[in-house]
Image (cartoon, rainbow, N blue to C red):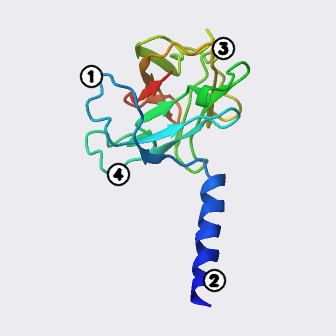
Amino acid sequence: MRSRTTALVVLAAALVSACTTTPSNEFVPIGDPRVQHAQRVKGFKCTPGNCRVEVVRNSDWLDRPICPVTVDVEILDIRMAGGPRVGQKVVFSIPQHYPYRFVAPTESGARYPIRIKSGTDPFVDKSARVPGPGKMLELDLKATPSNDLVEYGLLVARDEQPLSYCAEIDPWMVD
């Protein structure tokens, strides 16, 4: 009886983990000296139709008391597991109850919500969309990956008027 219960628990855990999009602490092979700590990182490998990354609170950041937010993965692998990228997108999201939002590039005086700091830009030009109340940022991927390591800056603001921009969030992507 005990072994059957254990088997059911293991099976249930496997099914739940197969459905989740949460990041895993796994090695993301990049071989680039700019990210020396990449031997064990919190990474997420996107697959076609599944590339959603959440912006989360980080209470450990004392230097960002106004906007203690970060992306929940250190390295985002957007190579789509070698699958086709035509029509694929990366979606960054902020939980509804967080007092932060993305700012649409069309808003008066708004800065662009993502900036490529180094590496080849993996996104279609001017494809950034911030639908609705600003809790999501959608970006279309270029059809062909560059096989580059990309450092990017993500810009969020406190959800108040006038806008109060947070310090740029700056993790990495493997394209």
Q: What separation in Å lies between label 2 and label 3 (alpha carbons)?
A: 47 Å
The part of the image, by quadrant, that contains residue 9 is bottom right
Examine the rendering and report whether any part of residue 3 can be seen: yes
Mark 1 or 4: in front is 1
The amino acid type of the residue labelled 1 equals: Pro
Give the residue pinned by disc 2. Answer: 4
The part of the image, by quadrant, that contains residue 43 is top left
| Mark sitting earlier along the chain (1/2) | 2
Give the residue pinned by disc 3. Answer: 143
Q: Position of residue 68 (x, y in %)?
A: 38, 43
| Mark sitting earlier along the chain (2/3) | 2
| Mark sitting earlier along the chain (3/4) | 4
Query: Alpha-carbon neighbours of circle 3 within 10 Å: few (<14), some, or many (≥20)?
Result: some
Query: Alpha-carbon neighbours of circle 4 within 10 Å: few (<14), some, or many (≥20)?
Result: few
The amino acid type of the residue labelled 3 equals: Ala
Give the residue pinned by disc 4. Answer: 59
Give the residue pinned by disc 1. Answer: 33
Instruction: Assign a secondary structure to mark 4.
Output: loop
Q: Position of residue 87 (x, y in %)?
A: 73, 21
| Mark sitting earlier along the chain (1/4) | 1
The amino acid type of the residue labelled 4 equals: Ser
Mark 2 or 3: in front is 2
